[in-house]
Amino acid sequence: MKKILFSVVASFMMLGVGSASAQTDADNFYKSDLVNMEKVSFSNQYKMKVAGNLFLPKDMKAGETYPAIIVGHPMGAVKEQSANLYAIKMAERGFVTLAIDLSFWGESEGEPRNTVSPEIYAEDFSAAVDFLGTRPFVDRKRIGVIGICGSGSFAISAAKIDPRLKAIATISMYNMGTASRNGLKHALTLEQRKQIIAEAAEQRYVEFLGGETKYTGGTVHELTANSSPIEREFYEFYRTERGEFTPEGATSLTTTHPTLASNTKFMNFYPFADIETISPRPMLFITGENAHSREFSEDAYSKAAEPKELYIVPGAGHVDLYDRVSLIPFDKLDSFFKEYLNIIP
């Protein structure tokens, strides 16, 4: 298993290796005749609207309650990118599922758009529990979560203080705090970190006085002969028809890019501190054998207490596990959640 991180500082994208799998099995925009979808929204504790897509198995029986799973999208993405796919596939297997847009992204509220706020991101997962746990068809004692890429770290942050999340799975997880402070494989020096912090601080003056918002990181908009393997890996998903999605009212020029002035908030984010306190609730860390983010899942696994499992997908890269249906271990997720969500304490 593994936890996943999404590139947020340009220098992160100069490291690592790309995808090793074929392209033909990518199915990000998967639809299913076995599932009904309903657009929903609810408020978090900050009274911000969180938008989501609720997926219900068509064979649900009136009067019965079902286990539920919240699905969080990669950092910088929206629910239509990877989260919907996971939610639909798990709904086909009998779970009520809810793919959410994190605050400041997609159809959820929050200004300025693309703001980084890990505390609020974690709160969105707890707000999703509030919503699901008050639906008459959901058993509130059987609610789990899947966090993809950066959402893996946000889901863990939420689970540390929300025991209503009974089972936690991460996919290609990025520890957004470690990635921002140190880069991949600790390639970011302290001086480089201080320079990033200084630039973001100066940008606050510009925006306080009404100046133009600046963005950072995210996915490049064109490839060159010098593009790194990681840049190419993300480009193939976010900048092609494979996974490109621009929410209504947004522009493709800013999709995936967090604001420069807020991005340093990740440097104060430590999702794996006290991760062992989540026990005895189970944790499953899924990562690809060739994923550039594999280090984060391995780190989380080493720090977590039992029950825990690290599940490595042979031949898979980081982005492969966003939408490559032949590589994503849905059977593993199914058995994990059925084991732990069908046991009511």
Image (tube, rainbow, N blue to C red):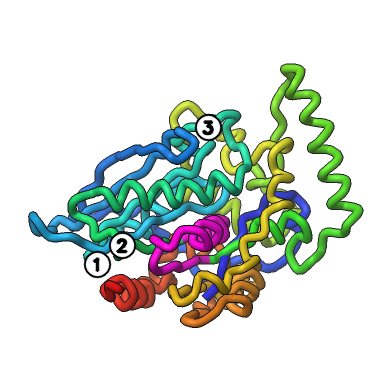
Percent x, y for residue 12?
74, 57
Q: Residues within 10 Å of mark 2 (few under 14, many from 20)?
A: many
Percent x, y for residue 277?
55, 71
Q: Which residue is mark 2?
A: 89
* Callout in the foreground (3, 2): 3
Report the front residue among 166 and 314. Answer: 166
Q: Which numbered disc, 3 or 2, marks the residue that appears first in the sequence? A: 2
**Marks 2 and 1, how far apart at CA:** 7 Å
- Residue lying furthest left in this view? 62
Residue bounds of the magenta highlight: 147-171
Q: Which residue is mark 1?
A: 93
SS of the residue at dot 1?
A: loop
Q: Quadrant of residue 176?
A: bottom right
**Marks 3 and 2, how far apart at CA:** 29 Å
SS of the residue at dot 2?
A: helix
- Residue lying furthest right in this view? 191
Task: Give the amino acid type for the residue marked by disc 2 in the picture.
Answer: Lys
Q: Which numbered disc, 3 or 1, marks the residue that appears first in the sequence? A: 1
Tell me the tag on residue 110: 3
269 left or right, relative to 36 = right
Q: Quadrant of residue 214?
A: top right
What residue is at 42 percent from the left and 60 percent from the top? 26
What residue is at 70 percent from the left and 43 percent from the top? 263
What residue is at 45 percent from the left and 54 percent from the top? 72
Q: Is residue 59 visible?
A: no
Percent x, y for residue 129?
37, 52
Report the front residue among 83 and 54. Answer: 54
Task: Give the amino acid type for the residue marked by disc 3 in the picture.
Answer: Gly
Q: Is residue 37 visible?
A: yes
Percent x, y for residue 107?
43, 35
- Tell me whether circle 2 and circle 1 mark residues in contact (CB < 8 Å): yes
**Marks 3 and 1, how far apart at CA:** 33 Å
